[in-house]
Image (cartoon, coloured by chain):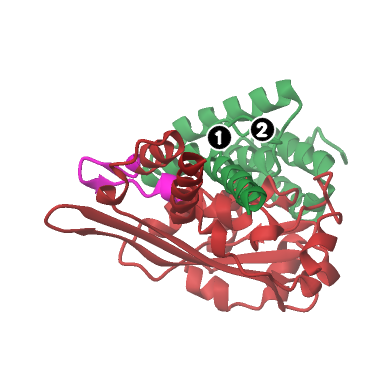
Amino acid sequence: MAKRSILLFAVCFLMFTLAQGCASGRKYAWGKYDTDLYYHYKKPQDREGHMERLKEIVDNAEAENRVPPGLYAEYGYCLYETGNIDEAVVYFEKEKVKWPESNVLMEKMVRNARRQQESLKRSSSTAPSQVQEEGK
Amino acid sequence: MRRSFYLILVTTLAVAIVSGCATAPKKDYSAFRAADPHSILIVPVVNRSMDVNAPDYFLSTLTIPVAERGYYVFPVDMVKHLLENDGLADADLVHNADTMKLCSMVGSDSVLYVSIERWDAKYMVITTQVTVDFDYKLKDCKTGDVIWTEHKGMVYSPQQNQSSGNLIADLVVMAAAAAITKGAPNYMPMSQQVNAATFADPQTGGLPAGPYLPAYRKDYDQQTK
């Protein structure tokens, strides 16, 4: 009986510790990704702040070699949205290499990004049709 | 001895309030095992509460606990934008859309559908009662079937927890106290706790360890006994 309750206590304590979701003991270096997203949804107009914070998270995680799934892509998409196509493609490719599960989506994103780049170039028509990147 | 028993009782009670861990029923994981998902697409959250901000806020709390279970989780914010661009700006539309179609859009193995059932604060004479309640469904991309489901919530009322002299119980109070700031409840700590308890462990009805965890396929055996 006493043994059982001790076990129960241990299990519940463990559960509780897990429920706390403390930053230590995590597999990936998330930084404040969840809080950042929350602020992003709270203040969507602060796009630059969101981008900066994402970049910081990605850089830190890369330095620790614990980049979480989706983070390269999330940052890449911000770059894409702000017209920074070449940089965006770099991050989509990084996501693809790190996480093979993202292959289909990242290929699609890279294609979209390239297409947009093409049409931007065509519409400005001042730049010569010289596309630096051939293949990946 | 009596004291320690009391301690255990208080702790268990306190934790049970937070996570409801003491009463988790055993689940059948055979469908999950057959599907063996490696990646999870978390789509925008359906809202059945009165708070229009709840779904976006809650979406931000889902990625970490799911990915930490060892699965590839698609970038939730990017996916949200892609769906909007595809004419699926409304989460209800996404939830009613064909699962397999969503899957093929991103190349996922499974889709996690979450709906907010409760997200509210009741202001009473002496206390405030904050309630969150969520419904989780994971569907397999190959069959469209539900392979895992959970329903979890949490009610927080400051009056309940104040008079404990116990360290762990006090921690609970501290965690829960963060839920209320100046009369405007902050639902995020509560949401995080509920999510953590929801996904954490197949022993308590959570997600089995995914391919990026060492326990992958090893925690299957225990839960089917």
Task: Point out the residue furthest to the top here.
Answer: A63
Mark 1: amino acid: Cys
- Determine whether label 1 and label 2 are within 8 Å by CB: yes
Image quadrant assignment for residue B64: top right
Q: Which chain is green?
A: A
Evaluate whether label 1 is on the same chain as label 2. Answer: yes
Q: Is residue B95 above or below residue B182?
A: below
Q: Quadrant of the C terminus of chain A?
A: top right
- Mark 1 belongs to which subunit? A
Element under disc 2: loop
Marks 1 and 2, how far apart at CA: 7 Å
On residue A25, the disc is 2
Residue farthest to the front, as pictured: B1
Q: Residue at x 46, y 37 (%)?
A: B168
Residue B94 locus on image (x, y percent): 56, 71
Q: In the rendered structure, which amino acid carries the disc numbered 2?
A: Gly
Q: Chain of mark 2?
A: A
Q: Position of residue A36 (x, y in %)?
A: 48, 37
Q: Residue at x 68, y 32 (%)?
A: A87
Describe the element under mark 1 as helix, strand or loop.
loop
Q: What residue does disc 1 label?
A: A22
Q: Is residue B3 left or right of residue A7?
A: left
Q: Which chain is red?
A: B
Q: Residue B23 lies in what quarter of the image?
A: bottom right
Q: Which residues are magenta?
A: B177-191
Q: Left or right: where does residue B127 sit relative to residue A17?
A: left
* Mark 1 residue crowding within 10 angstroms, few (<14) / some (14–19) / many (20+): few
Q: Residue at x 78, y 79 (%)?
A: B143
